[in-house]
Image: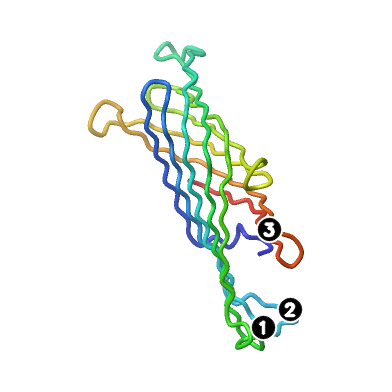
Amino acid sequence: FSDIEDELNFAFMLEYETRKGHWGLWGNTSYAHLGDSDVEGPLGLTKMDPTVNALWQGLGATYRLGAWDLADNSGKKKVSVTVDTFAGARYTYLNLEIDFKGVFQGRFNKVDKNKSWVEPLIGARTIWDLSERWTVTLAGDIGGVVAGSDFAWNAWGLIGYRFNLFGDKNARVLAGYRAVSQDYTDGSGRDKFQWDVTLYGPI
């Protein structure tokens, strides 16, 4: 795809985390379905329906460095920041399908290929408590280099609002933006596989 970000049909993301004291465990599951229909091939002799199913699964540990008060906010509550570091690994699975139509149909009706790899990652997260109800989260990680992708990065920013659900301000809703980028190459020549993609959008 020349502009793969325009071909996103469906995606979901699930975050989960547990912590006791300074130490914790985290996980992240993301899925994206990318594709287009009736893409014209060379000279307009054929059409293709390309589809990519992509799954990312991250697992790791987190360590809370601490929380610090920064300033007073109208005398009601101090603005504070909490800093977490984390490390782990991310598994990537890709499935590529291309259905051919036109003059090449019959010779190659369909291409179906899979690719997967695992890469280490390290990152940090900051949680800014602006008031009793409002928070801002900024986080990011880098991965690959020594294994998996040649280089990968992941960044997101969220605005959160605490509200009462089953107790006093014990629930929170968040909205923001996330970007994920991977540059992975395997093989050479006719067998070379390259996945150099950045996906981004609201969450």
| Residue closest to the eye, 11 or 105 | 105
Callout 3: helix, strand or loop?
Answer: strand
Circles 1 and 2: CB atoms closer than 8 Å: yes
How far from the left and from the top, in percent, is residue 109?
A: 58, 82
Mark 3 or mark 1: which is in front?
Answer: 3
CA distance for labels 1 and 2: 7 Å
Q: Residue at x 60, y 84 (%)?
A: 101
Q: Is residue 175 above or below residue 92?
A: above
Image spot of residue 17 (x, y percent): 39, 35
Instruction: Tell me the SS state at disc 1.
Output: strand
Q: Quadrant of residue 135?
A: top left
- Picture quarter with the N terminus: bottom right
For discs 2 and 3, the disc positioned in front in the rendered view: 3
Q: Secondary structure at mark 2?
A: helix
Q: Residues within 10 Å of mark 1 (few under 14, many from 20)?
A: some
Label 2: few (<14), some or many (≥20) within 10 Å? few
Residue type, label 1: Thr
Residue 119 percent location from the top left of the image: 58, 44
First in sequence: mark 2 vs mark 3: 2
- What residue is shown at x 65% (from left), y 56% (from top)? 195
Q: Residue at x 56, y 64 (%)?
A: 114
Task: Determine which residue is flagged by label 3.
Answer: 194
Residue 140 picture location, percent across and down: 57, 35
Q: Disc 2 marks which residue?
A: 42
Q: Where does label 1 land, which residue?
A: 46
Residue 27 drawn above or below residue 127: below
2 and 3 marks in contact (CB < 8 Å) = no
Please, what is the three-letter code of the amino acid marked with disc 2? Answer: Pro
Left or right, 5 with reference to 19: right
